[in-house]
Structures are given as C-alpha cells and as structure tokens.
Amino acid sequence: MLVSVYRYNPEVDDKPHMQDYNIELPEGRDLMVLDVLQLIKDQDPTLGYRRSCREGVCGSDGMNMNGVNGLACITPVSAAAKNGKLILRPLPGLPVVRDLVVDMTMFYQQFEKVEPYLLNNTPAPAIERLQSPEDRAKLDGLYECILCACCTTSCPSFWWNPDKFIGPAGLLQAYRFLADSRDTATEERLAGLEDPFSVFRCRGIMNCVAVCPKGLNPTKAIGHIRQMLLQRGS
Amino acid sequence: MVSRVSGATNLGRNGLHDWVLQRFSAIVLAIYTLGLLGWFAVNPDFSYGAWRGLFDATWMKIATLAAIIALCAHAWIGMWTIATDYLTSLALGKAATFVRLLFQAGCVILIFTYLVWGVQILWGL
C-alpha cells in the first residue's frame, strides 16, 4: 500500500513535504493505522509520531488520516485509506514540532481556562461528597473525553481563533462541571463564558461530533451551556 | 477564570446578547419575508397602486422598519464575526487590527447608509 506521510524536521527542512512509502500489508488482516506507522518506522527510523497505549485510551496518536482526524491506534486502514492510498498528516491548526507530532500548548491553555476540576466552597465532608445516581448520570457522555484534540483541531472556529475560542474539548469539560451537582461555582463559570468568543464562536458545524473517537457530542454540550447562559441572562 | 476574553466592537454587551439578537433578527426577517411572499400569493396581478397602498399603511411601515433594523443588526453581527474570524493577526500579522477596524468601519457606514436610505424610501413615497 502507498502511504504518504507529512514530514517536517524544523532543524533540517525549510518547509514540510509529503514522503511516500510502499508498505507490504499482511494478507487477510486489517491493520490499524498505528501498525502501519510502526512498519514505516522499521523502514525509516527518522519518522516521529506520538503513541502510548495503542488501544484508544491515552489519546496520544490523534492525527489526520486522509483528511479526517482520529486515533491511529483504533482506525483500521480499510476505513481510513481511499483509493488504495493512506495519507497521514498531523492534527491541523496546531504548530508542528516534528512530522506527526504537534505542539498541544494552545489546546491545553483553552482546557485550563474552563477550570476542569470540582469547585466547591462548602466545608468538606468527613468522607466524600455524595451524588444521587440521577445526578451522576448527567455526567455520562461528558467525562469520557481523553483529550486527544481530534475534535478541537477539526474545528474551523478554533483554527481562526485558537487563543480565544475554547474549542469543543474544553467546552465539553466546561459543561461537565456545570452539570455536576457537587460543583458550586456555576455562576462564576458561566460569567467566564458569556463573551463573544469562548462559547459563542461555535457555529454548530459539528465536525467535533463527526470525528470524536469516543463517540461524544460536544455540540450538544455547547447547546446546554448556551441554554444555561440564556436562562441566567434573561 | 483564566484571562477572560472581551469584545469591544461587537453589537451587544457580550456574546450571549449578540447570539440572541442574531436569532431574534432572523425570526423578524423570516416573518417579514413570509408575509411579503404571502401578499404576492394573494395579489398575483399586483399593480403599482396595490403596492403603494400596502406601503401607505402605517402597520406596513412599522413592519418594514422593524425588518430593516433587524437586517442591520443581523448584518453587523455577521460581518463582525467574519472580520474577527478571518482578519486576525494569525492571517495578517501586525496589520490585522488596522485592516479589521477599516473593514468594520466600512461595514458600519454601509449598514447605516442602508438604514437611513430605507427610512427615506419608506416615508418619502
């Protein structure tokens, strides 16, 4: 199979280029894209990419495969390749450190903005803060995010304003804590989200939903945040 | 919250205000457009006199003025969004703020002209 990989080493290259590799795939098996990268690495040890758990849990190997963001470790080659060709690029919209490795700083800065941890100003109980099963169920579909950045880097609003728009991953977490019955900072959290960029730069195109490898729905969470802001402001 | 984002040139006080205004103005424009289409449907062979009669009515002047104001608000929020998406320092470097303000000033002048012109047409017939 012909695999075309984005290559860029800022210490050597003036600009990025695509490098083609011919890879022999084993017959009768459908490899994951990460397996193909390993086969390329065996041929060419200079190729750089991130990987860790190789089973869709750590979120390290988010990349753009034939134009679609996803995790290389859980994307079968048969699903990613088009016309017998696999095209691998780094996640779009973030600075490239080297080859398929991107600098995630801007992504993490937006994540930090939403204060992704429980804020509770009441005295801590002796053991734990209890939550009813119904309230706990409200967090389903929100807490499972692995921060792979596939959604945020597929979002044009983040491409245009990565310093101002929080992006789908950050906003999913913002709603995860707005929806948490144990959190008491709802007012402060909402006050930090009502500007024209943080939430409202979302135009609802749902690229985030289309690419999320965990099947989550950031657009729905953003809709809930808008409703909360509307209730608070009207 | 870490470093809040602010907007100085958007129409409303904040993003929520703009968002509500954009949706409200869209509803006003949709109702006005459907109303006009309905009028055309029940007046298939409309004449200048009928058209004139429609716009002589005070309620039609009010509805049209509401539609013009809604269009102005809707257009400004939309153009502001476009300007702050594409005319940024990421795309244009140091000249971005100047170019963006110039573009926004052009939009304001155009929108204000349409508003005054619209009023003039409505009450000048």
Image (spheres, rainbow, N blue to C red):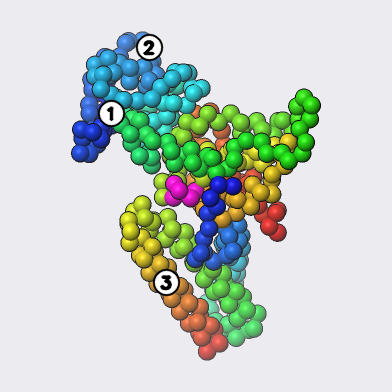
Q: Which mark is residue A5?
A: 1
> Magenta region: which residues?
A161-165
The residue at which mark 2 appears reads as A29
Residue A161 in sight: yes
In the figure, residue A2 lies in which quadrant?
A: top left
Is residue A194 shown above or below B74?
A: above
Q: CA distance from mark 1 to mark 2?
A: 22 Å
User: Dot 3 surroundings within 10 Å: few (below 14), some, or many (20 or more)?
Assistant: few
Q: Position of residue B42 (x, y in %)?
A: 59, 72
Q: In terms of secondary structure, what is the magenta stretch mainly?
A: loop
Asked if badges 1 and 2 are on one and the same chain, I answer: yes
| Dot 1 alpha-carbon crowd within 10 angstroms: few under 14, some 14 to 19, many 20 or more | many
Q: Mark 1 or mark 2: which is in front?
A: 1
- Relative placement, left or right, of A164 versus B26 is left
Chain on which label 1 sits: A
Closer to viewer: mark 2 or mark 3: 3
Chain letter for mark 2: A
For the residues marked 1 and 3, what is the alpha-carbon distance in whole angstroms? 45 Å
Amino acid at dot 3: Ala
Amino acid beneath label 2: Arg
Residue that carries the numbered disc 3 in the rendered image: B105
Q: On the image, which quarter does residue B60 sit in? A: bottom right
Element carrying mark 1: strand
Q: Name the mark nearer the viewer: 1 or 3.
A: 3
Q: Which of the numbered marks, if any, corresponds to residue A169? A: none
Q: Secondary structure at mark 2?
A: loop
Relative to residue A219, is residue A98 drawn left or right?
Answer: left
The crowding category of the residue bearing disc 2, from other C-alpha atoms within 10 Å (few below 14, some 14 to 19, many at least 20), is few
Q: Position of residue A28 (x, y in %)?
A: 36, 10
Residue drawn at the location 41% of the way across and 50% of the way down:
A160
